[in-house]
Image: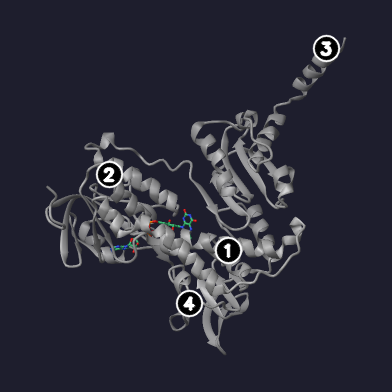
Amino acid sequence: MRSAKASGIYNVVVVGAGTAGLVTAAGTASLGGRVALIERHRMGGDCLNFGCVPSKALISSARLARQMREAEKWGLHKQEPQFEFREVMERMRARRGKIAPNDSQERFESLGVDVFRGEARFVSPHEVEVDGQRLRAKNFVIATGSRATIPQIAGLEAIPFFTNETIFDELHEKPESMAVLGGGPIGCELGQAFSRLGVKITIVHNGDQLLPPEDRDVAEFMQKQFAAEGITVRLNAQTQRVRTENGKVILETNEGDITADTWLIAAGRTPNIEQLNLAGAGVKHNEHGVEVNDYMQTSQSHIYAAGDIANRLKFTHTADFTARAVVRNILMPLQLLRQKVDFSVVPWCTYTDPEVAHVGLGEKEAAKRGIACDLFSVQLEEVDRAVVESKEAGFAKVLTRKGSDEILGATIVAPHAGDLLHEFVLAMNAGVGLGQIASMIHAYPTFAELARKAGDKYNKTRLTPFAKKLFAWLYRRARR
Ligand SMILES: Cc1cc2nc3c(=O)[nH]c(=O)nc-3n(C[C@H](O)[C@H](O)[C@H](O)COP(=O)(O)OP(=O)(O)OC[C@H]3O[C@@H](n4cnc5c(N)ncnc54)[C@H](O)[C@@H]3O)c2cc1C
C-alpha cells in the first residue's frame, strides 16, 4: 500500500525539478523507489522555461529571417521578412508549451512521484522542510541548478534589465536596440537571434574573445560573422556604471559609453544554494556550487547533487548524465558497487549560426596542458554539400595525439555542427581513430563528409617518402 504523501520515509527526496531533478525522480520511480520531488518555481527548470527550449525556438525564427534577407544566395529575390516581433515571441512560447507536458506535475504524479511545490530547506542531514511539511528520506538529491549572475555595477539596482529568466516571457515589443552583457554562449546565441529579428545589438564582453572556452580562431570567426550581420562586439569592456538618460540605458565602460533601449545580462551563472540551509545539513559548498566526489556524493555521503549545482560544465546533457549516475549509485548498497562519473568526453554546442560544437581538447587547452598534438583542418568549402547549399562559411578542426590517429578533440563550425559532432564523440568514446573514420563510407553529399575529409588528411600524413617510393616502384613494375 502507498504511504500518504509526506508521511513515512522516502527512498529519495529530490530538490529542484529541472533536468537533473526530473531525471533523478523519474529514474528512481521507474525502478520502484518512493520519491518526493520539490520545486519552488516552474516544473522543467531552466532548460524548458528559460534556457535551451525557448532560446532554440527563437533562434529558429531568426535563422529563417536571415535566410529571407539572403535569398539571393539561392537564386531567389531577397526580401525583408515581414513579421510582428510579438508573434515571433508568441510562437516561441507556443513551441515551449508543446514540450512542457513532458515535465509537468501531472506527468510526474502519474509516474508515482510525490510532487511538492515550494522552497525546500534542510532542517537536518535527514530532513527537508517544504511548505510547512517535513520530508524524511534515506537519500537526498540537490538539483537546484543555477541562475544568471548579476555583476556588481554601480547604478544597477535602479535600472531594469532582462536575464534569461525574464526575457522570454516579458519582452513583447521589439526594442530598437539592446546591449547584451556577456559574450559567452547565451549572449552570443541571443544577441544574434535578436539582431536577426531587427534589434540593433551590441555585445559587451569583459574578456579578449567571444566564447571564452573556444580557440581564438573559432571566436574570431564568429566575431567576423557577427560584424557581417551588423552586430557590434566590444571586447575587453568592463562595465563600471549604468544609468538612464532620455529613456535610454547607458553602460559606462572603460571602452566608452554604450547606449541602448534595453539590456540583457548574460554574464555567467551563480549556483542556487542560498535557501537550502546547507550548513544545517552539513553539506560543503563553494562559490561554484555544491562540492561532490566522483560518485556525485556531497560531504554527506547519503546526500547527492546533480546538474548545474554540481557540474563545472553546465549543460542539460551533463545534468541528465549526472542524474542518471545518481540514480544508479543510490540504488547500489555499497560504495564499491557505485560508479564514478567520467567527464573525459563531454560535447557541447553553441547554437549560433553557424553552430559551434566542441568535444575534448582544443588547441588552447592542449597547449595549456602541454599535450603534443597534430591538427587536421577542413574548410567547409571543401565539402560539396556545403557548396550546393550556399553554406560554405565554417570549418572543422580535429586534434590527434602527436604521431597517431587517436582523436583528442574536435571543433566544428558549421550548420548542424552539434549533430555532426557526434561522429567524433562516438569515436572518442569507442577509441576509433581518425584513420578509421576515413575508411568508413560516408553518404554523399553530406556535411558529415567533413569528418571523412579530416580522416583523409590524417591518412595522407602516413604516406612517408619511403612508402611513396615503394608505391611508385610497384606501379612501374606493373607496367612492365
Ligand atoms: C539561455 C540559456 C540557454 C541554454 N541553452 C542550452 C542548450 O542549448 N543546451 C544545453 O545543454 N544547455 C543549455 N543551457 C543550460 C541548461 O539550461 C542547464 O544546464 C540545465 O537547465 C541545468 O539543469 P538543472 O536541473 O541542473 O537546473 P535547473 O534547470 O536550473 O533546475 C533547478 C530547479 O531547482 C529549483 N530550485 C532551486 N532552489 C530550490 C529550492 N530551494 N527549493 C525548491 N526548488 C528549488 C529551481 O526553481 C529550478 O526549477 C542553457 C541555459 C540558458 C540560461
Circle 3 Cα neighbour tier, 10 Å, few/some/many (<14 / 14–19 / ≥20): few
Toward the viewer: 477 or 368?
A: 477
Q: Amino acid at mark 4?
A: Phe
Q: How is the image coloured?
A: one colour
In the rendered image, the residue lying farthest to the bottom is 246
Res. 291 in view: no
Q: Is residue 456 above or below residue 212?
A: above
The mark that comes first in sequence, 2 or 4, is 2
Q: Position of residue 50 (x, y in %)?
A: 44, 64
Circle 4 Cα neighbour tier, 10 Å, few/some/many (<14 / 14–19 / ≥20): some
Res. 26 in view: yes
Tell me the CA gap for discs 3 and 4.
Answer: 76 Å
Tell me the CA gap for discs 2 and 1.
Answer: 37 Å
Element on which disc 2 rests: helix
Quadrant housing residue 73? bottom right
Residue that numbered label 4 is attached to: 161
Toward the viewer: 321 or 67?
A: 67
Q: Are marks 3 and 4 in contact (CB under 8 Å)?
A: no
Tell me the CA gap for discs 2 and 3.
Answer: 66 Å
Residue that numbered label 1 is attached to: 61
Q: Are marks 3 and 1 in contact (CB under 8 Å)?
A: no
Quadrant housing residue 192? bottom right
